[in-house]
Amino acid sequence: MFWKKKPDLAKVRAEQTKMAAGLLSAARLQFPQLSRLHQALVGTFLFGMLHADGAIRGLEPAQIHALALIVFAETFDYSSELNAQAVQECINATSPGYHDTMNAVIHRGIDGHRQYCQGQLSTLGENLRSILAHFEGGA
């Protein structure tokens, strides 16, 4: 075969949207009630989880990013403009030196993906909540 088998992105989308809901549930968060800073931190953490999931599945970066746009829209109910801006900032933050704090939160999200896949939901929730607590106001 001269071509690579295409992944079922609709299935991946459904699984990633479920993972996003699982993250919010594990951390006991109501996203609309969070401050903008905490919303940005949750989105950055989730991007790390989505990035890890896509990499494990062997998805291309463009596929990972497209799925992140969809999952963010479905999970956070962002406007199209805010959604695109949030995902682009996360993409940029994967480059070391662009935004060290966001990069660190993305890496915590990568670890959160492992916690989610291993069913360590209370640990996953604590992981995210500890990040939020680090910033002014807690969660």
Image (tube, rainbow, N blue to C red):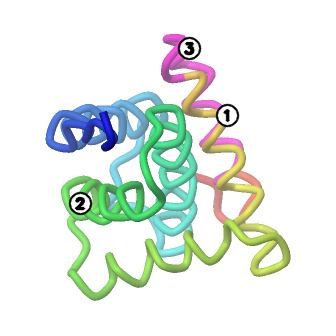
Instruction: Residue type at mark 2: give it.
Output: Ile
Q: Is residue 38 left or right of residue 31?
A: right
Secondary-structure class at tag 3: loop
Toward which corner of the image does residue 17 lie, by quadrant?
A: top left
Estimate the x, y position of residue 78 in percent, counting from the top left. 25, 73
Tell me if residue 136 can be seen.
no
Principal secondary structure, stretch drawn in magenta: helix
Q: Earlier in the sequence, mark 1 or mark 3?
A: 1
In the drawing, does residue 127 fall left or right of residue 96? Answer: left
Residue 111 is labelled as 1
Q: Is residue 125 magenta?
A: yes
- Measured along the vertical axis of the image, is residue 130 above or below residue 126? below
The amino acid type found where label 3 is placed reads Gln
Say what secondary structure mark 1 lies in: helix
**Dot 1: few (<14), some (14–19), or many (≥20) neighbours within 10 Å?**
some
Where does label 3 land, which residue? 120
Residue at the image point whose x is 50% and y is 23% from the top: 116
Return the x and y of residue 115 as percentages of the image width and height: 59, 22
Which mark's residue is nearer the viewer, 1 or 3? 1
77 sits left or right of 58 in the view? left
Q: Which residues are magenta?
A: 116-132
Query: Which of the two labelled residues, at mark 2 and mark 1, occupies the earlier sequence position?
Result: 2
Contact, mark 2 vs mark 3 (Cβ under 8 Å): no
Q: Quadrant of residue 108?
A: top right
Separation of marks 1 and 3 at Cα, in angstroms: 11 Å
- Could you tell which of marks 2 and 3 lies nearer the N-terminus? 2
The residue beneath circle 2 is 70
**Residue located 23% across and 60% down the image:** 70
Q: Going 36% across and 30% down the picture, which residue do you hit?
A: 22
Q: Residue at x 69, y 55 (%)?
A: 105
Q: Position of residue 138 (x, y in %)?
A: 64, 55
